Structures are given as structure tokens and as C-alpha cells.
Amino acid sequence: MKELMRNAEQEERSVLKTSEPPDECGLPDGARLTLILNRRRIWTAFKRSLVMMRPDLQKKNPFILVVEIGAILTLLCVLRAVFGHSHAESLSYFISLDAWLFLTVISVNFVTALTE
């Protein structure tokens, strides 16, 4: 673990030693983006975005809470149609709607986790 931290620090130093002129923050052009978007930070933000799907944490953002509730309701409609308790005419519509709703919730949570 210490070696991973040392390697990450060395990468950050090597990025900062580039010959590009500094921007308004005093960092070279690509250095700020590299410092913000590294694999470890993105992976941590992705895991946090999945944890943030808990409804008690979603209460801070009521719009996304409503989208998540809609995703859960459409998932129940899909499961009901799959098990034969409903008409399967609109099954593909509900599957695609559910995918988009869950993708919306996860992406908003990802951005929120990345900025924190």
C-alpha cells in the first residue's frame, strides 16, 4: 500500500515537472486534470456512487430521490411482466426506461462523489 502511495506521489510530481506554462492556478495545463482524474479517485467515487443509492442519503437531493423511486417502480413492473402477471407488450420499453433511470441516478451520484 505504501508503495502504491509512493508511486502516485511520484506520478503527481512528474506531471508537475512538465515544461508546459502554468495556468491561473499555477499548474501546467494537463496537471490539474491529471490530479483530479486518477484511477484510484475514480474507482472510489464509483463505489461511493453505488453506496449513495440508499434512499436515506438521497433525501438531500429530492429530484434524484424521485428518479430512483421511479426506477424501482419500473423494475417492479419489469419483474411482474417477466413472471407473467402482466402483459409483456411493453416489456422492452420498461427495461430500457429502467436502465436509463438507474443510469441517471448512478451518474449523478458519481459526479457528486467525485466532487466531494
Image (cartoon, grey):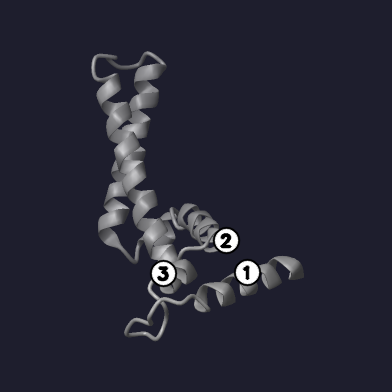
Q: Quadrant of residue 79?
A: top left
Is disc 1 in contact with disc 2, using a CB cutoff of under 8 Å?
yes
Residue ranking furthest to the front: 19
Residue at mark 1 to residue at mark 2: CA–CA distance: 9 Å
**Which residue is tagged 2?**
40
Of 56 and 101, nearer the camera is 101
Residue 8: x, y in percent? 63, 69
Vertically, is 87 above or below 56? above
With respect to residue 63, does 90 lie above or below? above
Judged by depth in the image, the label closer to the viewer, 3 or 2, is 3
Q: Residue at x 40, y 86 (%)?
A: 26
Tell me which numbered mark, 1 or 3, is placed earlier along the sequence: 1
From the image, tell me which residue sits under label 1. 8
Residue 114 position, x and y percent, is 43, 65
Q: Quadrant of the N terminus?
A: bottom right
Q: Indicate the secondary structure of the residue bearing disc 3.
A: loop
Q: Nearer the viewer, mark 1 or mark 3?
A: 3
Local secondary structure at mark 1: helix
| Residue type, label 2 | Arg
Instruction: Please name the residue shown 64% across and 73% down the image.
Output: 10
The image quarter containing residue 87 is top left
